[in-house]
Amino acid sequence: MSILSRIRAHGGEVIRDEWRFRLRAGRLSPEAIVWLRGHWREVCREVWPAFDLWDERAAILQFDAGLTRADAEAEAYARITVC
């Protein structure tokens, strides 16, 4: 069973807004929430398969182009969502 399926089975949901994610915990236990914090990148990959591509591009833009992390994340999102 996927992480996302387990979250949903407990009434929770992961909400994606562009490249940002948040958890609506539902009936998840405090222990489950702590575990999710430690595995958050895995959750993001399940919710958005392009997560790793976006993250890599944001890092490249941050270091090679000298952008702030926030600007690099926005620019990377714009670049990978172009049709």
Image (cartoon, rainbow, N blue to C red):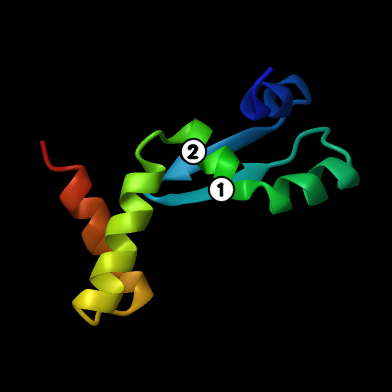
Q: Quadrant of the N terminus?
A: top right
Q: Amino acid at mark 2?
A: Arg
Question: Residue at 68% across / 24% down in the picture?
Answer: 8
Question: Residue at 72% across / 45% down in the picture?
Answer: 36
Q: Is residue 49 left or right of residue 7?
A: left
Question: What label sits on residue 45 in the rendered view?
Answer: 2
In the rendered image, the vertical position of residue 27 relative to residue 56, given as above or below: above
Q: Position of residue 17 (x, y in %)?
A: 42, 46
In the rendered image, the vertical position of residue 1 relative to residue 35, given as above or below: above
Q: Amino acid at mark 1?
A: Arg
Marks 2/1: CA distance?
Answer: 6 Å
Q: Is residue 74 left or right of residue 3?
A: left
Q: Residues within 10 Å of mark 2 (few under 14, many from 20)?
A: few
Question: What label sits on residue 53 in the rendered view?
Answer: none
Which element carries disc 2, helix, strand or loop?
Answer: helix
Q: Are marks 2 and 1 in contact (CB under 8 Å)?
A: yes
Q: Which residue is mark 1?
A: 41
